[in-house]
Amino acid sequence: MKKVVLIGDSIRLSYWERVAELLDGECEILTPEGENCAYTMHTIRRVRDWFREWGTDRVDLIHWNCGVWDHHRNAEDGEPFSSLEMYLSLQKRLLSQLSRYSDRLIFATSTPAGKQYVQNPNGLCAIPREEWNREIALYDEVLCAYLCTKGVSINDIGGLVGSDTDRFITPEDGVHLSPEGVEAVSRQTADAIRARLAE
């Protein structure tokens, strides 16, 4: 059976079990269960640990999403945790690490905020929703252009969710997936994994 790794933030935490159900009998899913992989920098820090915990050094495919946390405003300067230049550099480093474990890689784009997003000048989401979503789209555009030159497939879950945030983003916080969003993202992700494994 094919071994597939799913890495990512709370968006991945919401969909990985459904993806595992959809791929049952086709793939064994390895994932940091219960762990929010958060910032790209944190993911870089933890990749080697996870593979040691799973007891393997090669898998058939890795699917990852890191991005939303890198837009958080954590400091007094009001700037994103990772600038665009820093984000691209960190993702290049992460790609180098992931490539040691698999030749088949899929990057999932970051999901935008819905209308229930609450701007908090003193919190992590300190900029208006429109600016937040523009920034996410810009980071994705630059990173995906680079990843495509390295043979990485793109699973545009950000585009999927952005096509109807009223349906796919929960009204509870305007950031995470609704049940319908989980199902849609899970199905698209399972299809992307099947397609890449078939290459």
Image (cartoon, helix red, strand yellow):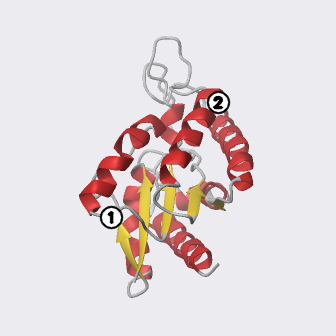
Badge 2 element: helix
At numbered mark 1, what does the secondary structure look like: helix, strand or loop?
loop
Q: In which quadrant is the N terminus drawn? A: bottom left
Count of numbered tags: 2
Between 54 and 107, the one nearer to me in the picture: 54
In the displayed structure, 103 sits above or below 47; it is below
Q: Where is residue 97 shown, x and y percent of the image?
A: 48, 48
Q: Position of residue 25 (x, y in %)?
A: 38, 88
Residue 38 seen by the camera: no
> CB under 8 Å between callouts 1 and 2?
no
Question: Residue 183 at what x, y percent from top left?
Answer: 48, 71
At label 1, the amino acid type is: Thr
The residue at which mark 2 appears reads as 84
Marker disc for residue 76? none
Local packing at callout 2 (Cα closer than 10 Å; few below 14, some 14-19, many 20+) is: some
Residue 75, quarter of picture? top left
> Is 35 located above or below residue 58 in the figure?
above
Q: Position of residue 144 (x, y in %)?
A: 69, 49
Q: Residue at x 64, y 54 (%)?
A: 162
Left or right, 20 with reference to 108 = left
Of callouts 1 and 2, the N-terminal one = 1
**Residue at 51% across, 29% down:** 119
Residue 135 visible in the displayed image: yes
Q: Is residue 7 above or below residue 185?
A: above
Which residue is located at x 43 percent, y 19 percent? Answer: 122
Q: Is residue 50 left or right of residue 140?
A: left
Of the 4 image quadrants, the one containing the C terminus is bottom right
Q: Is residue 126 above or below residue 33?
A: above
Q: Amino acid at mark 2?
A: Leu
Residue bearing mark 1: 56
